[in-house]
């Protein structure tokens, strides 16, 4: 009210109203808005939001986890059940830590800080007015975030290199914090998506474990064993690289700029393979080959894994087929197909690289029975360590199924 009386009318300027409470305090037991948020969204004339007409709600995220890894996973899911239901809102999150977790988090260095910020960013996708971040006083953090670091290095608590976040074109990385980097998975997203979107579902790349429920835990009807609960833990040593395709004009969609690994020349609505543009496919192939070379130089080819979903699956298979280096550790192909322009190596069996293909039988975008299965015939003829896994009733873009498939692949590659 004071802002409006001062001359900044609703038509000229938005007012940001801070919601300092956590998401749990803003929702009641039934998932309805409560407290200040309920008052702001009230449907009568006294509702602050309706009365003003140009109010942006600032959601301040408050950390509650009790470990560095817990903070990362908490950030990945920070927007669930709240952000997507809000009217105009922005997200405010902090990267610095205070209290008991300050020292262990800082010991993990700038990689941990950058990943925390990237996960918060990814979980703010529903916010109509974006996000802003508060950086702590770790020496060099602001310069690194803005790309101004001189790279001179420093002590354990300093930030000595430029961050790739928040550049939307840069790939996102899930680091093996606290353990030695020993393996790398490069996973490519589908058409219209981006690498950062996987940070909201980091469990795709975790190990699924069972732990005994503590006394007082509510029974989960989905648990086969009432005394156990499912939990997800990161693989020690595994680095997950999530590249992002560029925005490019798509010929089949009248030149609309869409994130895509290559240009589509046709849109046959899933009834058969679309024609792909060779130049843009080759461009992405060179980029992923270069990324493979970087990771192979760090951990060795047999410890580098490649995969992707949908269009990303197609590119991953094409990259694998054209890779001239030592055999990779494994390929995971989800809800995609082998491009007709991809010449699968006849000597693939001699390379010994496992290929695991996962697909939903209810997929209407890339239809398995009518053409996608046949597209894999060159792999079947080449032989080698190849397995197919199909699921009844699973359509394209099923998040639960994709996560289950990737975890299945990783559990096989990293037994025990």
Image (cartoon, rainbow, N blue to C red):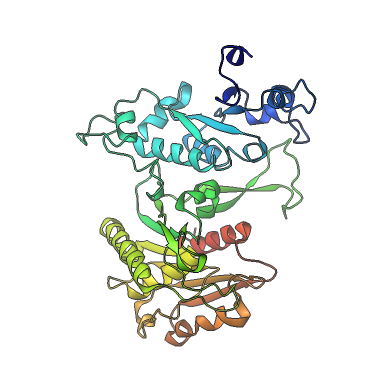
Q: Is residue 415 above or below residue 116?
A: below
- Residue 362 % position (x, y): 67, 71
Nearer-the-camera pick, 105 or 40: 40
Pick the front one: 211 or 266:
266
At 36% from the left edge and 22% from the top edge, which residue is drawn? 137
Q: Residue at x 34, y 43 (%)?
A: 164
In the displayed structure image, the side of residue 306 where residue 8 appears, left or right: right
Q: Please name the residue shown 49% across and 61% down the image.
A: 410
Q: Is residue 332 visible?
A: no
The part of the image, by quadrant, that contains residue 148 is top left
> Relative to residue 15, is residue 168 drawn left or right?
left
**Can residue 314 be seen from the camera position used here?**
yes
Q: Position of residue 288 (x, y in %)?
A: 34, 62
Expressed as whole percent of the image width and height from the top left, the position of residue 168 reads: 41, 46
Please, is residue 313 above or below residue 346 in the view? above
Q: Is residue 219 above or below residue 415?
A: above
Is the N terminus in the top left, top right, bottom left or bottom right quadrant?
top right
Residue at the outermost left position: 152
Q: Is residue 146 left or right of residue 41?
A: left
Residue at the image point whose x is 80% and y is 25% from the top: 44
Q: Position of residue 295 (x, y in %)?
A: 31, 57
Relative placement, left or right, of 147 versus 92 is left
Q: Quadrant of residue 315?
A: bottom left
């Amino acid at each position: 009210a004071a802002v409006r009386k001062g001359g900044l009318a609703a038509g000229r300027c938005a007012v940001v109203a801070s919601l300092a409470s956590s998401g749990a305090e803003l929702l009641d037991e039934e998932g309805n808005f409560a407290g200040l948020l309920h008052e702001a969204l009230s449907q009568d004339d006294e509702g602050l939001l309706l009365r003003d007409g140009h109010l942006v709600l600032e959601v301040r995220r408050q950390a509650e986890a009790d470990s560095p890894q817990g903070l990362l996973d908490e950030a990945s899911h920070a927007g669930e059940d709240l952000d997507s239901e809000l009217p105009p809102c922005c997200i405010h999150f902090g990267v610095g830590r205070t209290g008991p977790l300050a020292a262990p988090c800082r010991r993990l260095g700038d990689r941990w800080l950058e990943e925390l910020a990237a996960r918060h960013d990814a979980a703010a996708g529903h916010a109509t007015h974006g996000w802003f971040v508060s950086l702590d006083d770790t020496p060099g953090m602001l310069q690194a975030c803005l790309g101004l670091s001189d790279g001179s290095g420093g002590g354990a608590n300093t930030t000595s290199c430029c961050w790739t976040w928040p550049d939307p074109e840069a790939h996102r990385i899930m680091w093996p914090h606290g353990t030695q980097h020993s393996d790398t998975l490069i996973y490519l997203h589908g058409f219209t998506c981006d690498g950062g979107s996987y940070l909201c579902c980091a469990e795709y790349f975790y190990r699924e474990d069972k732990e005994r429920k503590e006394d007082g835990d509510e029974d989960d009807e989905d648990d086969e064993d009432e005394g156990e609960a499912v939990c997800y833990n990161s693989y020690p040593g595994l680095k997950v690289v999530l590249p992002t395709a560029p925005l490019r004009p798509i010929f089949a969609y009248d030149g609309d700029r869409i994130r895509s690994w290559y240009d589509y020349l046709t849109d046959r609505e899933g009834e058969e393979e679309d024609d792909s543009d060779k130049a843009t496919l080759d461009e992405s192939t060179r980029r992923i080959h270069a990324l493979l070379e970087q990771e192979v130089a760090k951990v060795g080819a047999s410890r580098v894994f490649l995969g992707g979903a949908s269009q990303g699956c197609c590119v991953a298979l094409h990259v694998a087929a054209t890779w001239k280096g030592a055999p990779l550790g494994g390929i995971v192909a989800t809800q995609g197909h082998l491009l007709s322009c991809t010449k699968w190596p006849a000597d693939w069996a001699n390379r010994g690289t496992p290929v695991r293909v996962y697909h939903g039988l209810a997929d209407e975008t890339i239809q398995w029975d009518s053409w996608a299965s046949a597209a894999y015939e060159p792999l079947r003829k080449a032989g080698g360590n190849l397995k197919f896994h199909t699921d009844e009733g699973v359509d394209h873009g099923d998040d639960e199924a994709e996560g289950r498939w990737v975890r299945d692949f990783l559990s096989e590659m990293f037994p025990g």
